[in-house]
């Protein structure tokens, strides 16, 4: 019999305390439902510890060679037969009402990907809400940046399969790329402002490496540079904003802050640069 929900937690050399907290929160939220719970070990050094934590929390433990977050998530999905999918990083947590609210939303609008509000937290107890974007804002602004966290999302297996999962060539921002491909495939996003997940802030997390994050933001920008017209909203504004954003992040990389790097990037995006100039000129004239 097909399960209603699958929860997949990729991990790699995880902090045991963080992982235990993540799995405990997921177990509590998923308790009322028929749920497949999987931990995917992406080639960690201490497999026995992670396996013990996963088993004690009631999660099935899977192990694979190291391939990154996208690879681990895709690998886990292969071992599920559920109608809906949820992903949570090994250092984050969800609240007890997450799946109750999101499954109700998905059953009401199965064509839309569900996301909720979320917040940052740290070990000192500090909490800061992550900016919430409405469904309408996501529709118009998703190509500008990653507007919600992966652990705030619930989607159907059919949606996941339609875009062939996460892009395993991206070691970072693979979630933003995934949302963009869902949007291009015609799926909408249904948001609810209720905070149902939280993202831990700590020195070891991937997002703290700003230089690397910026490099892969530019990579995602370039990946969709030829498809501006396929996104909703003002095409000229999208082209202008995307070029400006991609250029800024590209130039923040120390190994690319040279005239050679600047000319290379400008040559690749000369069309967007021209559109940026025209759009700015138009906005100035309108004002």
Image: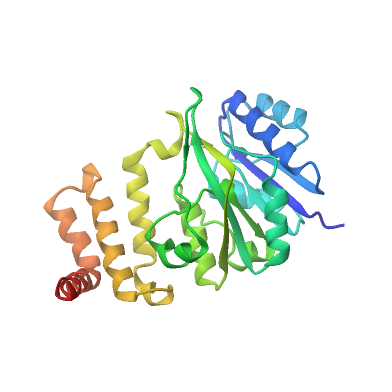
Q: Can residue 158 be seen in this view?
A: yes
Q: Is residue 60 visible?
A: no
In the picture as drawn, the residue positioned furthest to the left comes out as 259
In the picture as drawn, the residue positioned furthest to the front comes out as 287
Q: How many labels does the image show?
A: 0
**x and y percent of residue 264 in the render?**
19, 60
Query: In front here: 4 or 191?
Result: 191
In the picture as drawn, the residue positioned furthest to the right comes out as 1
Q: Which residue sits at x=54%, y=66%?
A: 182
Where the N terminus falls, by quadrant?
A: bottom right
Where the C terminus falls, by quadrant?
A: bottom left
**x and y percent of residue 147 in the render?**
45, 54
Q: Is residue 107 above or below residue 206?
A: below
**x and y percent of residue 210 in the render?**
34, 40
**x and y percent of residue 208 in the render?**
39, 36
Q: Which residue sits at x=62%, y=66%?
A: 112
Q: In this view, does 42 lie above or below 1?
A: above
- Residue 260 in the figure: left or right of residue 149: left
Image quadrant assignment for residue 94: top right
- Residue 54 in the figure: left or right of residue 74: right
- Residue 3 in the figure: left or right of residue 117: right
Q: Which residue sits at x=68%, y=25%?
A: 48
Q: Which residue sits at x=17%, y=56%?
A: 262
Image quadrant assignment for residue 279: bottom left
């Amino acid at each position: 019999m097909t399960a209603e929900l699958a929860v997949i937690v990729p991990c790699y050399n995880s902090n045991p305390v963080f992982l235990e907290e993540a799995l405990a929160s997921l177990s509590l939220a998923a308790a009322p439902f028929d749920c497949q719970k999987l931990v995917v070990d992406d080639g960690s050094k201490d497999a026995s510890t992670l396996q013990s934590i996963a088993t004690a929390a009631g999660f099935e433990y899977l192990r694979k060679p190291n391939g990154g977050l996208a690879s681990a998530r895709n690998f886990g999905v292969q071992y599920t037969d559920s109608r809906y999918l949820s992903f949570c990083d090994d250092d984050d947590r969800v609240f007890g009402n997450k799946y109750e609210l999101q499954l109700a939303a998905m059953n009401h609008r199965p064509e839309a990907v569900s996301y909720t509000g979320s917040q940052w937290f740290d070990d000192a107890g500090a909490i800061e809400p992550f900016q919430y974007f409405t469904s309408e804002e996501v529709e118009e602004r998703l190509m500008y940046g990653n507007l919600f966290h992966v652990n705030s999302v619930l989607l159907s297996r059919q949606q996941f399969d339609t875009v062939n999962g996460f892009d395993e060539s991206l070691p970072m921002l693979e979630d933003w790329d995934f949302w963009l491909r869902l949007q291009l495939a015609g799926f909408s996003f249904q948001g609810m402002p209720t905070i149902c997940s939280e993202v831990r802030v700590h020195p070891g997390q991937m997002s703290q490496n700003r230089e690397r994050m910026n490099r892969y933001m530019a990579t995602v920008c370039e990946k969709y540079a030829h498809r501006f017209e396929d996104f909703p909203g003002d095409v000229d504004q999208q082209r202008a904003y995307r070029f400006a954003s991609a250029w800024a992040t590209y130039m923040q990389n120390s190994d690319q802050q040279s005239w050679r790097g600047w000319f290379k990037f400008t040559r690749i995006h000369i069309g967007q640069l021209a559109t940026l100039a025209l759009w700015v000129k138009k906005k100035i004239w309108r004002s």
